[in-house]
Amino acid sequence: TLGKPVVMGRKTYESIGRPLPGRPNIVITRDRNFTAEGVTVAHDIDAAIAEADRQARAIGATEIMIIGGAEIYAQALPRTDRLYITEIEADIDGDTVFPVLEPRVWQQGDRTKAVVDEASGLSYSFITLNRIGD
């Protein structure tokens, strides 16, 4: 995501705890009083994407990156041309999931071989999915 505008929900921003360096940060929140240093605040997905597009043009970036959370992913998915997925090879308990992807809509592009993270011992792969017909 380095060098590209990132769009995230407020809870995702708060879980990170600071703006991600080296890229414009746009935070979506319904809270009209929310402010945070080093980020642009938007109040809906349309405003966030418009601002991310504006900032991408200003810095010469060709993509904007949607980095979560679940509600933001669900709202942005219909407008998305490409997905960069990190697939972790483990069953992990949680109450938030990525939206279900329709196989007839997405075609797999690049896929890295599974890599083992030394700290956690978990295997993961990076997968690119491209919208079919775009």
Image (tube, rainbow, N blue to C red):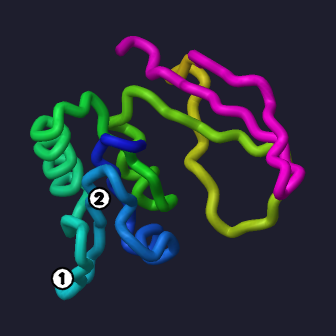
Quarter containing the N terminus: top left
**4, 65: nearer the viewer:** 4
Categorize mark 1 by other alpha carbons within 10 Å: few (<14), some (14-19), many (20+): few
Magenta segment: does it hold 132?
yes
Q: Mark yes or no: residue 74 visible.
A: yes
Q: Quadrant of residue 41?
A: bottom left
Residue 32 tag number: 1
**122, 49: nearer the viewer:** 122
Residue of label 2: 25
Indicate which disc, 1 or 2, sits on the residue closer to the N terminus: 2
**11, 19: nearer the viewer:** 19
Comparing labels 1 and 2, the label whose residue is closer to the camera: 2
> Percent position (x, y) of residue 70?
51, 59
Amino acid type, label 2 = Asn
Residue at 24%, 77% in the rendered image: 37
Whether residue 6 sits left or right of residue 84 in the image: it is left
Q: Is 124 drawn above or below residue 17 in the view shown?
A: above
Magenta segment: does it hold 33?
no
Amino acid type, label 1 = Arg
Number of labelled discs? Answer: 2
Q: Is 21 drawn above or below residue 116 in the view shown?
A: below
Q: Which residues lie in the magenta part?
A: 108-134
Whether residue 62 sits left or right of residue 87 in the image: it is left
Q: Secondary structure at mark 1?
A: loop
Q: Is 25 drawn above or below residue 122 in the view shown?
A: below
Looking at this view, name the residue that lies furthest to the top.
Answer: 133
Residue at 53%, 34% in the rendered image: 84
Question: What's the CA distance linking mark 1 and mark 2?
Answer: 17 Å
Whether residue 87 sits left or right of residue 96 in the image: it is right
